[in-house]
Amino acid sequence: MKKHVKTISIALAGMLMLAACGSKDSAGGKTGDGGEKEKEYKVGISQFAPHPSLDAATEGFKKALEDKGLKVSFDEQNAQGDQNNTRTIAQNFVGDKVDMIFANATPSAMAALGVTQDIPILFTSVTDPVGAGLVKSFDEPGDNITGTTDNHPDATKKTIDFITNEVGAKKIGIVYNSGEQNSVVQVEAVEKLAKDNGGSLVKVSVSTTAEVKQAAESLVGRVDAIYIPTDNTVVSALDSVISVANSKKIPLFVGELDSMKKGAVAASGFSYYDLGYETGLMAVEILTGQKKASEIPVALPQSLTLMINKKAAEEQGLEVKDEWKDAGEFYEGE
């Protein structure tokens, strides 16, 4: 008799345990057909600075995960252009045990890789991932990192060719932060391209956004045009450069389309939203276990366009020529 009671008690306990497990699986979340709870992923977003291109890349990244139906909570942080903040943000993500870090711009990516070799890292808006030490190569990025680069091989050449050949500017002023690896790489490329076209550079380096306007003013009377690369520090204070270019009638050129729309003559580029979206599709593959970061090559932008801002050209003393249509597309404003 005692043995029979014990058997019933064990069976009852087992049923209660199964019922408890079923309650836990279904509580607080959506379940699949098999009764399994939908997984929620936690993604840390580290954006280096607030400016239109980086903002657009972040939005594109988030939209890709949404479109693919993943349930994701984002911890979105902005370093406000301070490289010290990027490390603190990355360390906090590691402490919070996020499933992935999305690093928007080179300093944020470098900081993330410096604090974890385990959490998958996806970067975007990075000009030279190999030179910055983020990846070994485009095809074999590394154990826990990959992403997209904003350095289309033809983008800078298209713009510099337009400046020197179509506009006729030979002395080009460039303002950049020498502390940003991505900017140093771009300045070197621009200098070579300008030299190949019979031009030269006048370089001015800054450390903070507060120095940008004075740097732009120092170029007045010394250059035929100004070029601003995709430098996070300078682009964050681009309005001050546009003000100088307009008042002193110096044609201003930039490294990406969002800055061109704000008031530069031309830029050769692509949609940063699309670049972020492409990075988000990579994130889906990694989070759902389809691929490891090491198995996804670093990707280039898929399209490239030279766009000319007619209003900005006129404001900065340039006569807009019909034949410029052969070099690119006219931007009429939004």
Image (tube, rainbow, N blue to C red):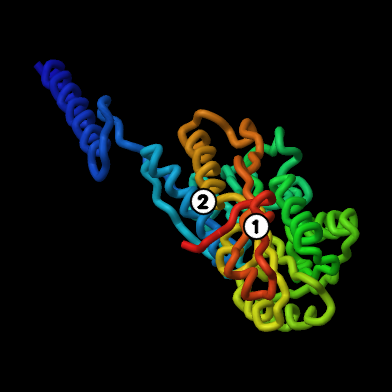
In whole angstroms, how far apart are the C-alphas of marks 1 and 2?
30 Å
Q: Is residue 106 visible?
A: yes
Residue type at mark 2 is Tyr
Which label belongs to residue 322? Answer: 1
| Residue 54 tag number | none
Residue 273 or 264: which is nearer the viewer?
264
Amino acid at the residue labelled 1: Asp
Seen from the viewer's position, the closer of residues 199 and 88 is: 199
Q: From the viewer's perspective, tell me whether residue 147 is left or right of residue 37.
A: right
Residue at 68%, 68% in the rendered image: 319
Viewer-closest of 89 and 13: 89
**Residue 67: image x %, image y %?**
39, 41
Residue sitting at x 69%, y 65%: 253
Give the residue drawn at x 55%, y 58%.
Answer: 46
Residue 9 x %, y %: 15, 25
| Image coordinates for residue 230, horizontal then vertical, percent | 68, 60
Q: Residue 87's spot in the image, x, y percent? A: 63, 62
**Is 6 drawn above or below residue 183 in the view shown?**
above
Label 2, secondary structure: give it.
helix
Q: Looking at the image, is 202 positioned above or below residue 104?
A: below
The quadrant where residue 66 appears: top left
Q: Is residue 84 visible?
A: no
- Badge 1 crowding class, 10 Å Cα cut-off, few under 14, some 14 to 19, many 20 or more, is few
Q: Which mark is residue 273?
A: 2
**329 vs 33: above or below:** below
45 horizontally vs 162: left or right: left
Farthest residue to the left: give it.
1
Q: Quadrant of the N terminus?
A: top left
